[in-house]
Amino acid sequence: MTRSPRSAAARRARENAAAFAEREAKLLTLAEKFFALEADSPAAKLEADIKAQEKKLAALREKLASARVETQQHLAAPVAEMKTLKVSTDEIAARLGLTRSEVNALLRAAAAKADTESEGE
């Protein structure tokens, strides 16, 4: 008994489809394994740690910026007092180990602070 060409073609199509499905299932399993290994790799863990540390560092940089402003305001008061005692900017700079521009910046900060305090009253 001979099979019809149609039934042979259908059988081959089913076999090919089954082989294709089996191959796709294996490929899917291998891809899942790949991504699981990649996610659990030491490099991925280090990258996650680096991202966490970078976030902490950014927060610290923000705190540093505000701390510098606060520090400058605190340092400005003694410099302004020296200036009220008729000490020159050059002498203040020499006594404190600062540049003239740093002394001038502190004097401007003291003046700005005094202006804001007088406006608040």
Image (cartoon, helix red, strand yellow):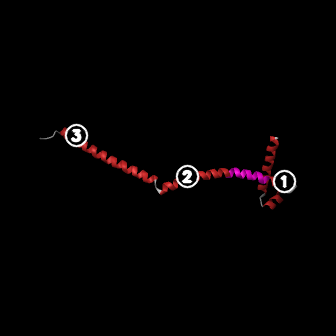
Query: Which secondary structure is most common in the magenta stretch?
Result: helix
Would residue 9 be found to the left or right of residue 53 on screen?
left
Residue 111 drawn at (x, y percent): 81, 48
Q: Secondary structure at mark 2?
A: helix
Residue furthest to the right in view is 86
Q: Secondary structure at mark 3?
A: helix
> Is the Cβ of the residue at disc 2 closer than 8 Å to that at disc 3?
no
How far apart, in angstroms, are the residues tagged by discs 2 and 3?
56 Å
The magenta region covers: 64-76
Examine the structure image and report whether residue 120 is included in the region drawn in magenta.
no
Q: Secondary structure at mark 1?
A: helix
**Residue 81, label in figure:** 1
Sequence-first disc among 3 and 1? 3
Say what amino acid the circle numbered 3 marks. Ala
Figure quadrant of residue 97: bottom right
Say what amino acid the circle numbered 1 marks. Glu
Question: Which residue is pictured at 80% across the width and 50% down the height?
Answer: 110
Examine the structure image and report whether residue 73 is included in the region drawn in magenta.
yes
Say what amino acid the circle numbered 2 marks. Lys
Q: Nearer the viewer, mark 2 or mark 3?
A: 2
**Residue 41, label in figure:** none
Residue indicated by mark 2: 51
Sequence-first disc among 2 and 3? 3
Residue furthest to the left in view is 1
Residue 92 drawn at (x, y percent): 82, 58
Would residue 117 be found to the left or right of residue 64 on screen?
right
Question: Which residue is pictured at 46% across the width and 52% down the height?
Answer: 39
Label 2 packing within 10 angstroms: few (<14), some (14-19), many (20+): few
**From the image, which quarter does the C terminus lie in?**
top right
**From the image, which quarter does the N terminus lie in?**
top left
Residue indicated by mark 3: 10
